[in-house]
Image (spheres, rainbow, N blue to C red):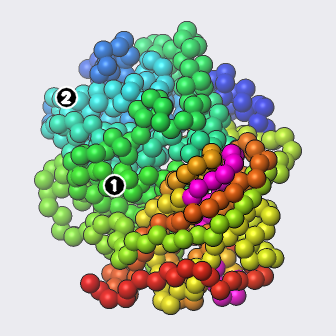
Amino acid sequence: MRHKRTVPVLASAVLLCSGLAPLAMSTPAQAATIPSPGHAVSHEENVRVPAGALWTEHYFPSSDGSDVELHADVLRPAHLPPDAKTPVILSVGPYFGHIGQTGNDGFTGTGPSERFNDLIEGADLMARGYTVVMVDLRGFGGSTGCLDWVGPGEQADIQAAVDWAASQPWSTGKVGMYGKSYDAVTGLVGANQGRPGLAAVVASEPLWDMYNYLFSNGVRRPNYLGTPQAYNGIASLPGMKDDSDHYKQNADYEKTHRECLANNLKDTQDPDRTSGYWKARDLAAMAKGSQVPLFVTQGFIENNTKPEDIQRYLTNHAGPTRGWLGQWEHVRGNETNSQGRLLMGRAGWFDEVMRFYDLHLKGINPSVADPNFLVEGSDGVWRAQDSWPVTKRETTVRLQPGSYVDNGRARTAAPQTADDAGVWDMEHAPDLPTGPQDQGYGPKPRTTDDGKGFYSWSKPVNSDVRVAGTPRVSFTAQGEGNVLVRMWDVAPDGTAVMFDEQMSLVRTGTVEFDLKSTEWTLAKGHQLVVGIGTNTTRSWSDTPSNQTITVSSASLSLELANVRFDTPAQGDVSPFLASYLRSYTSSWTDTAPGSFPLNVPQGQG
C-alpha cells in the first residue's frame, strides 16, 4: 500500500537526484550484530532478524560476464542443522537495502530487509522449513553495477540469483520466487527465463511490459521522468554505519560511477515502444512458451501497475497459471486497512500461496483444491473459474464517426509535491482523483458531442453482460495529435461509471491499440458508452497539437460473457471499489437510444 508523501517537489527532487535520504531521528545505540564468516546472526543478537531465523550475507557475480557483484541476505531456519537442505523462496529487487526499502526508514542498526516479513511470519516459513533469499539488483543495496530498469543487465542478475539459490549446499535445488510490484516483475522475468531450479513464481501486481509504466502508445505518463529519478534515488542510498565495509563500498558504487544515474534518466525516455530498449523489456512477449508454474494477482482498477498486457502475458505463458483478479489497488493479498478489512477482500492468501509452493517445491499435494482463478467482479462478488478471461462471444461493434480538437486538459499551477510532478516509484503511485474535474468529460448536455470528444452508445443490454479481457479500438484518422478513448457503464437514470481508458498518439492513417484489460458487468438495461477525444485527465502528460482530428471507420473489439453460470467463491468486496466508484461516477443529464447491440447468448454451452 502506498504511503502519502507531502515533501515539496523541489526538495524531493533534490533528495532523489542526489541520492540523499531524509534525515531520521537518531538515538544512541550500539552497533548492530552482523554476520561474519562462520557465524550466522539470530533474532536474539539482532532484532531485525525474524524470530526463528539465522541471517547470513553473501556475494556472487551476475551471469552476464560483467564485473557486477550481487549481494544477498539469507534467512535460514534456526532449528535446522546448517547443512540441512531446504527449498528456497527467492526475491530479487531494488527494495532490499539495509537502510530502507525506498528511502531511509529510520532504523537504528543494520539488518536484513523487513520487506517480506509479513510472508515470513504470516506463513511461518522458518518452521515450515523454507530458506528465504533476498538479492539486491545491480546498483541497489549491497550490489554493484548500474541499475537497468528490468533490462538485460537486471535480467542477468535474476538468472544468477536463481542459479545461485538452487546450487547452494543447503538448497534442495527447488526455488520459488515471490514479490509484489517491482520484485513481482523480476518474478515474471524468472518465469520467462525458465532456469532449471525455478519451480514456481508468485507475482503480485506486476508490470507486464515495462514500457507501460512511463508511456502509452507514444504518449508520456506524468511520471515518465520522475520514476527514473525515484529509482536513481533508491540506487544512491548508502549502507548503514554498522554495515560491513564490503557492503558499504558496494552501496557507494554510484558515487564513482555517475554515468549510472545519467544513463537511467536518458535511456528510459524513448516513447517508441518498438525500440530495442523497450523490446528488451516487453515481458509479455518474452513469456512465450514459459512452463514455470505461475500465481499472479492483478487489480483491474489499479491506479499504479495497471492491467495492461496481462492478457497477452497469460496467453503466451504456457505453464500452469493461477490468479486472484479483482477490483483493488496496489496491495498484497494479506494486507488490511485500519478497520482490519482485507484490501483484496478475500481471506486465506498465505494458506493458498503455501499450498502452491508446497506442491511445486516440496511435492506435497494440497488437501484443498484451489481454483485456477478467483475473480472479483465489478459488483464485488467473487467467482471461481478455470481460466481468464472466460468469454461467450467476441464481437466488433461499429462506432460513430466524428471529430474533436486536440487541445488537451487545462494545465494547473506549478506542482507542489512529488506526486504532482510524477516523482514516484512503483510502490508509491498517486491516490485516486478526488473531484469531478478529474473524472473526465462525458456527453453532457448533448448526447453525442461535448466539445472535448464524441460518443457512441450501445443499445440497452437485455440481460447482464460482462465485458472481460482486453478491448481494442481501431479507426482511420485525419490529422495529428493525441486521442483518449474511454468506456462508461451508464444506467437508465444517467449515472455513469468510467471503467476503462487508454491514450495514443495519432497520425493520419489507421490507428489501433488496446485499452486496459478489464472485468466489468453492465446490468440489464445499462448502456456502454465509448468516448473518443482529447485528453481530459491527469493520467497522461500529452502535448496537445491543437489540430482538428477527424475519425472515421471506427470500431471496438470486445470479449463478452453472460453471468448466469458463475461459480460463487468466498470473498468480500474489496474496499477500494467504493473509493473508485466515488472518483469515477458522474451523473449525465441525457441518454441516447444507442446505435449498436451488445448482448450475449444466455445458454451454458
Crowdedness near tag 2: few (<14), some (14–19) or many (≥20) residues, C-alpha within 10 Å: few
Q: Nearer the viewer, mark 1 or mark 2?
A: 1
In this rendering, does residue 591 appear at all?
yes
| Amino acid on which the number 2 mark rests in the picture | Gln
Q: Residue 25: give x, y in percent of width and height.
A: 68, 32
Q: Nearer the viewer, residue 256 or 77?
A: 256
For the residues bearing labels 1 and 2, Cβ distance under 8 angstroms: no
| Amino acid on which the number 1 mark rests in the picture | Leu
Magenta stretch containing residue 477, yes or no? yes
Vertical relation: 21 (above or below) 250: below
**Number of the label disc, if any, that sits on residue 52:** none
Image point (29%, 21%), residue name: 63
Image point (41%, 32%), residue name: 280
* SS under mark 2: loop
Magenta stretch containing residue 252, yes or no? no
Image point (29%, 27%), residue name: 160
Q: Which residue is mark 2?
A: 168
Q: Nearer the viewer, residue 399 or 89?
A: 399
Q: Which segment did they paint magenta?
A: 475-494
Image point (34%, 85%), residue name: 565
Q: Residue 497: give x, y in percent of width and height.
A: 64, 73
Q: Which residue is mark 1?
A: 314
Q: In the drawing, does residue 457 fall left or right of residue 289?
A: right
Q: In the drawing, does residue 216 fall left or right of residue 52?
A: right
Marks 1 and 2, Cα distance to the nearest angstrom?
A: 31 Å
Vertical relation: 241 (above or below) 580: above
Secondary structure mainly formed by the magenta segment:
strand
Q: Residue 423: give x, y in percent of width and height.
A: 67, 38
Q: Residue 302: give x, y in percent of width and height.
A: 55, 58
Q: In the drawing, does residue 451 fall left or right of residue 459?
A: right
* SS under mark 1: helix
